[in-house]
Image (tube, rainbow, N blue to C red):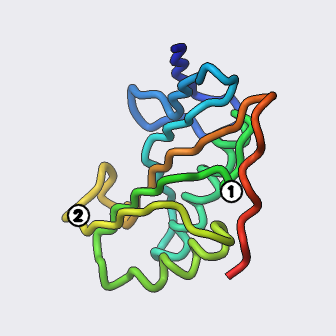
Amino acid sequence: MQITLDNPAGAQQPLGPYSQVARVQLPDGGALLYLSGQIAEGADLATQSRGVFEMLTALLDAHGATLADVINIRTFLTDIDELPAYAAVRREFLTGTPPTSTTVEVPRLFRPEALIEVEVVAAVAGPAGPRPAPRLAQ
């Protein structure tokens, strides 16, 4: 099994000494992508959420994946009462059948101004393997 750690040039660079993406190459040519938690600037949760999903999109794109390939999402909120605002933005970006998910409230994040952090795992089919089934609109 081959594991590649990456900070793609086209995506925002990490805020500390870590890799943004861990790509685990699978024997069939597919891969699992583990993306580090992403935060974004903005005055409110909706703005930060949009920025986070835009960064996740760029990181996935750098590895030939899209948000449709996401199989797990973990969300950390500093105020669980803001969940509806996050959920509305999430539905804009994750259409169709939702991935497995965990959302928790935390007292604070890496940056004091951060209201949300999101990390994902994506599965990318190999060249000979089938593409994931299209997501159904809900």
Residue designated by label 1: 68
Q: Position of residue 136 (x, y in %)?
A: 72, 72
SS for dot 1: helix
Mark 1, Cα crowd under 10 Å, few <14 / some 14-19 / many 20+, is many
Q: Is residue 107 left or right of residue 67?
A: left
In the rendered structure, find residue 106 and report the number of the disc placed on it.
Answer: 2
Q: Nearer the viewer, residue 102 or 80?
A: 102
Q: Left of 89 or right of it: where is 38? A: left
Q: Which mark is residue 77?
A: none
Q: How many marks?
A: 2
Query: Relative to 69, is 102 above or below?
Result: below
Q: Earlier in the sequence, mark 1 or mark 2?
A: 1
| 96, above or below 120, in the image | below
Relative vertical location of residue 6 with respect to residue 80 in this rendering, above or below: above
Determine the secondary structure under disc 2. loop
Q: Quadrant of residue 26?
A: top right
Q: Residue at x 43, y 47 (%)?
A: 37
The furthest residue to the left: 107
Which quadrant is home to the C terminus?
bottom right
